[in-house]
Image (spheres, grey):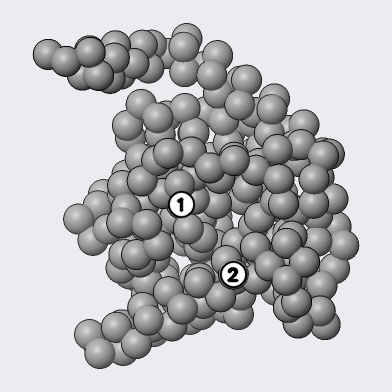
Amino acid sequence: MSVKSHAKYFIKKILRSFFVRLLLSSLAAFYLTIVYKTTKWKSYNAQIMKNAWNGSGPVIVVFWHEKLLLMTNSWKSRKPFYMLISNHADGKIVASTIRWFGISTVYGSSSRGGVTAIKMLVKKIQSGSSIGITPDGPRGPKRKLSDGALFIASLSGATIIPSSSATKNHFVLNTWDQLEVPLPFTTGSRVWGNPITVPRKCSDQELERLKIELESSLHQVTKKSNGLVNNIIVDQSNNEDT
């Protein structure tokens, strides 16, 4: 076994420890709290999410996996919210971290193969909870939409809201998704796209059309969120300081 393989095995073994995961998640939550509190945020299309927070029905918030750490603090409602997180050791660290911000977890995958997770999420929605999904997670390919969010929306009747976030100062991890890690004392953005509704009885052709629409919307909101923090001109009419 090579040195690299030994290192990977050792890291995986350490991450199986509950106490190690608790320590890492506590440190991560503390760091992210500092980031969130020292960042000046701008929101685009914020009324879309305000309608969701004040409305009666649950929603499905969808964003790319690379934005996971940036989106953790974007749910500004007392209503219950669940994130779909992988059941791997790193996923459990993420789950413990986001719990500090009032987000609960369902373990599994958003692909059609993750039948158990999909059923659990549909039940959460039917009980009044909103959910968050990274449709290219947990292992990619990056920014390639799986059918899971559309499938859940069709079964539950919940509306999908494409979203994204960015910070001007951040660094990127050498992971499959190029996960963005925000830095403190910077400017940040949150962008919400137009809601997408999926009919309960949806043909394969209609599902494919909606998949293209959702993926395109995710690309657009991601581009806008990055543009807002990098002073790239976007439509300013729906901007709001937060």
Residue 166, position as x, y percentages in the image: 66, 55
Q: Residue 47: which quarter of the image? A: bottom right
Residue at horizontal 23 percent and vertical 13 percent from the top: 3
Left or right relative to 26: residue 154: left
The residue at 42%/74% (across/down) is 215
Q: Quadrant of residue 200?
A: bottom left
Query: Which residue has dot 2 on it?
Result: 223
In the rendered picture of this protein, how many numbered marks are placed on residues? 2
Please tell me whether mark 2 sits on a helix, a strand or a loop: helix
Q: Pointer 2: residues within 10 angstroms few (<14), some, or many (20+)? A: some
Q: Report whether 37 appears left or right of 165.
A: right
Please provide percent x and percent y for residue 132: 51, 55
Q: Quadrant of the N terminus?
A: top left
Does 236 sit left or right of 211 as displayed? right
Dot 1: element: helix
In the image shown, does 99 or 187 lie closer to the viewer? 187
Residue 114 x %, y %: 25, 52
Contact, mark 2 vs mark 1 (Cβ under 8 Å)? no
- Where is residue 138 drawn, in percent x and y? 35, 47
Q: CA distance from mark 2 to mark 1?
A: 15 Å
**Mark 1 surroundings: few (<14), some (14-19) or many (≥20) residues within 10 A:** many
- Please give the label number shown on residue 171: none
Comparing 38 with 171, the one in front is: 171
The answer to whether 169 is drawn above or below residue 229 in the figure is above
Circle nearer the viewer, 2 or 1: 2
Q: Tell me which label, 2 or 1, sits earlier in the chain.
A: 1
Q: Residue at x 76, y 41 (%)?
A: 36
User: For mark 1, what is the residue?
Assistant: 65
Three-letter amino acid code at disc 1?
Answer: His
